[in-house]
Image (tube, rainbow, N blue to C red):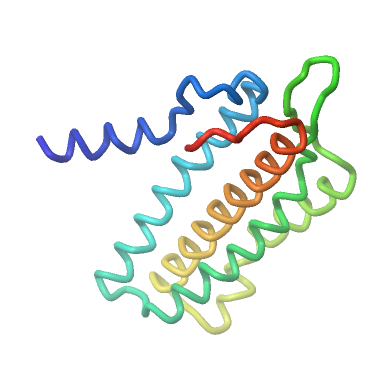
């Protein structure tokens, strides 16, 4: 029964309630943030599980997570989040530099086994990858929320919690 309440709390935290600033954020952007939250929670759970099971050391996991945070902040650059005057909403779109960064991100994702496979093998490599991916998701969430908060504060709105 407590697990049901726990999952309800998580799902409720993903829901941006009827906050006054919600109407000034594009639905696609809200949906993208919610997806990132869900993926971030799952990957962080996998990372913590691997650490608690002793599959990966906490130092290596933390290192991968910090590397992922850095990459997540860079990946936030893929989307230009800006105020759309006509719609009076915060919207996002890809930019040219963002596409280049995304290509590097895809190249990194495809070659991470080759990059880290020289030093890390087997289940430790998988756990390390979960740590990096969790960091990337959390980094992207934080970066997008900072951009949203800055844009909304420039237009005299407060960003919603969640």
Q: Quadrant of residue 80?
A: top right
Position in image of residue 104 (x %, y %): 77, 58
Determine whether 76 is above or below 54 in the image.
above
Image mark count: 0
Position in image of residue 126 (x %, y %): 44, 65
Query: For this rendering, which residue is in front, 106 or 133?
Result: 133
Position in image of residue 134 (x %, y %): 49, 57
On the rendered structure, is 129 left or right of 56?
right
Q: Residue lying furthest front in this view?
A: 156
Residue sitting at x 36%, y 75%: 56
Residue sitting at x 39%, y 36%: 13
Q: Quadrant of residue 30?
A: top right
Q: Residue lying furthest bottom in this view?
A: 119
Query: For this rendering, which residue is in front, 157 or 90?
Result: 157
Q: Residue lying furthest left in this view?
A: 1
On the rendered structure, is 22 left or right of 97?
left
Q: Quadrant of residue 90?
A: top right
On the rendered structure, is 89 left or right of 63?
right
Q: Residue lying furthest top in this view?
A: 86
Position in image of residue 48 (x %, y %): 33, 63
Determine whether 136 is above or below 34 in the image.
below
- Quarter of the N terminus within the rendering: top left
On the rendered structure, is 8 left or right of 85?
left
């Amino acid at each position: 029964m407590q697990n049901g309440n726990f999952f309800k709390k998580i799902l409720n935290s993903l829901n941006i309630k009827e906050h006054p600033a919600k109407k000034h954020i594009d639905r696609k952007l809200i949906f993208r943030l919610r997806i990132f939250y869900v993926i971030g929670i799952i990957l962080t759970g996998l990372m913590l599980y691997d650490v608690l099971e002793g599959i990966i050391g906490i130092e290596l996991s933390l290192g991968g997570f910090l590397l992922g945070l850095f990459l997540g902040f860079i990946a936030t650059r893929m989307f230009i989040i800006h105020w759309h005057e006509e719609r009076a909403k915060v919207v996002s779109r890809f930019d040219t530099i963002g596409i280049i960064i995304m290509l590097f991100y895809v190249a990194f994702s495809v070659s991470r086994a080759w990059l880290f496979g020289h030093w890390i093998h087997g289940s430790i490599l998988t756990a390390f990858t979960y740590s990096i991916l969790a960091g990337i998701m959390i980094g992207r969430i934080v970066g997008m929320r900072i951009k949203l908060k800055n844009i909304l504060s420039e237009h005299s709105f407060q960003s919603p919690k969640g």
